[in-house]
Image (cartoon, rainbow, N blue to C red):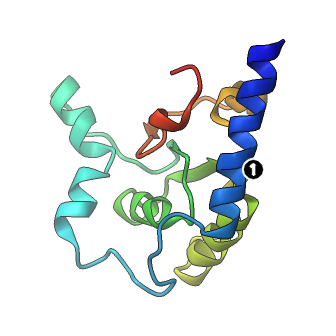
Amino acid sequence: MQTDNKNQEIRDKIRQQFDSAPYGNVPLDLSPKKNAALLYLHNLVTPYHLRNQKIINPEGKVILDAGCGSGYKSLVLATANPGAKIIGIDISEESLKLARQRLAHHGFAEAKFYAMPLEELPSLGIEFDYINCDEVLYLLPDK
């Protein structure tokens, strides 16, 4: 019980930090469309081809952006994977407000964002084809 309380206390402090200063201080209107290297690194086709020596169409695939913050990487994922369904989770609702605004601004209003800790991800009941998790694992109490 004491460990659970300590973990919750840590999570609350992290949430407070990101609510007051959402991570991913990227201007809302900045588009990744001209950043070929960034798009290449975050498209589903590249890792799938390297593993299977086949090309996959990202349309209809479900991509999780775990710890999505203010959504810039979610935007990169949406741009790099046309037709894929983007789902972002983060513990900061303030960051998620920016993520929703960002993706809607760039024409990806169908992206879904949930305020939840990574450990509660199974409660969504969603299977993912690809998971992006940048700058998050070090924040977890039980890596």
Q: Is residue 65 left or right of residue 94?
A: left
The amino acid on which the numbered mark 1 sits, given as a three-letter code, is: Ala
Q: Position of residue 31 (x, y in %)?
A: 38, 80
- Where does label 1 land, which residue? 115
Please tell me which residue lies in front, 29 or 116: 116
Q: Is residue 42 left or right of residue 141?
A: left
Residue at 78%, 19% (x, y): give it.
4
How packed is label 1: few (under 14 Cα within 10 Å), some, or many (20 or more)? some
Please tell me which residue lies in front, 37 or 118: 118
Residue at 20%, 35% (x, y): give it.
49
Residue 46, compared with residue 84, is above or below; it is above
Q: Position of residue 36 (x, y in %)?
A: 18, 68
Please tell me which residue lies in front, 10 or 130: 10
Location of the N terminus (image quadrant): top right
Residue at 63%, 34% (x, y): give it.
118
Asked which secondary structure carries label 1, the reply is strand
Q: Is residue 109 left or right of residue 66?
A: right
Q: Position of residue 125 (x, y in %)?
A: 74, 28
Residue 130, compared with residue 43, is above or below; it is above
Q: Position of residue 140 (x, y in %)?
A: 56, 31
Residue at 71%, 70% (x, y): give it.
97
Please tell me which residue lies in front, 70 or 19: 19
